[in-house]
Image: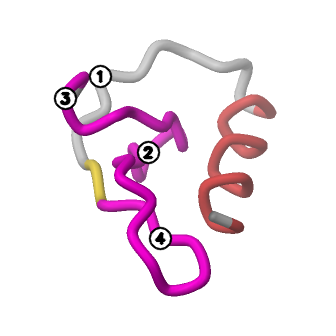
Amino acid sequence: MAQTTALQKAWEAKGSPPCDHPHTEKEYASGMQTGDVVCTTCGAEFWRSKK
């Protein structure tokens, strides 16, 4: 989740341009899956059913 926050802040610093979310990965917190996926480009979080 720390990586997600870092990605989100970096994306905001770029002016939050549109992202097609080309690559996503499962999100983990304390070693356990959260049920969400995260865009590895901009840090956007999605429920699996939304992506």
Label 2: how many residues lie within 10 Å, few (<14), some (14-19) or many (20+)? some
Given the image, on which type of amino acid does mark 4 rest? Tyr
Tag 1 and tag 4, C-beta contact below 8 Å: no
Whole-percent x and y of residue 26?
32, 61
Tag 1 and tag 3, C-beta contact below 8 Å: no
Q: Earlier in the sequence, mark 4 or mark 2?
A: 4
Given the image, on which type of amino acid does mark 1 rest? Asp
Given the image, on which type of amino acid does mark 3 rest? Ser
SS label for mark 4? strand
User: Mark 1 = which residue?
Assistant: 20
Q: Earlier in the sequence, mark 1 or mark 3?
A: 1
Q: Alpha carbon of mark 4 to alpha carbon of mark 3: how far? A: 17 Å
Given the image, on which type of amino acid does mark 2 rest? Thr
Q: Main secondary structure of the magenta part?
A: strand
Q: Earlier in the sequence, mark 4 or mark 3?
A: 4
Number of disc labels: 4
Q: Is 37 left or right of 8, judged from the image as shown?
A: left
